[in-house]
Image: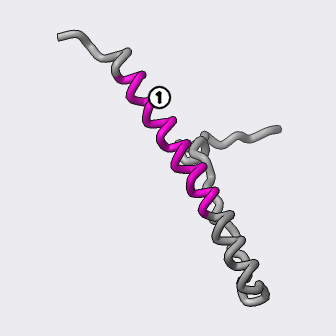
Amino acid sequence: MLHFQPMEEADFLPQKKKPQLRPLDSLSIDELHAYIAEMREEITRVEGEIRRKKASAEAASLFFKKAD
């Protein structure tokens, strides 16, 4: 016999994982500079995604806005 528990709202929310920190003590200065460049590229990519999502939300808001 199977027993099911009711699902909670939290069961549907995405689970956020904290990014693993990279150990820095074994990296050379050049490797640290390269790592910073990689992180800056990722920040730029994330900021672009934020802009894209804001634009989509704004477009949807304008589309579904009620006429006064």
**Viewer-proximal residue, 3 or 15?**
15
Magenta region, main secondary structure: helix
Q: Secondary structure at mark 1?
A: helix
Q: Is residue 67 left or right of residue 11?
A: left
Q: Which residue is mark 1?
A: 56
Residue shown at the point (72%, 76%) measured from the top left: 22
Q: Is residue 50 left or right of residue 42?
A: left
Would you identify the image quadrant in which residue 60 lies?
top left
* Magenta stretch holds residue 54: yes
- Residue 5 position within the rendered picture, expressed as x and y whole percent measured from the top left: 65, 43
Label 1 amino acid?
Ser
Quadrant of the snapshot with the C terminus: top left
Q: Is residue 44 above or below residue 26?
A: above
Residue shown at the point (47%, 28%) measured from the top left: 56
What span is in magenta?
40-61
Would you identify the image quadrant in which residue 48 lies?
top right
Q: Is residue 37 above or below residue 33?
A: above
* Magenta stretch holds residue 48: yes
- Residue 25 position within the rendered picture, expressed as x and y whole percent measured from the top left: 73, 89
Residue shown at the point (82%, 38%) measured from the top left: 1
Residue shown at the point (26%, 13%) measured from the top left: 66
- Residue sitting farthest toward the left: 68
Q: Is residue 32 above or below residue 4?
A: below
Mark 1 crowdedness (10 Å alpha carbons): few <14, some 14-19, many ≥20? few
**Viewer-proximal residue, 49 or 14?**
49
- Residue sitting farthest toward the bottom: 25
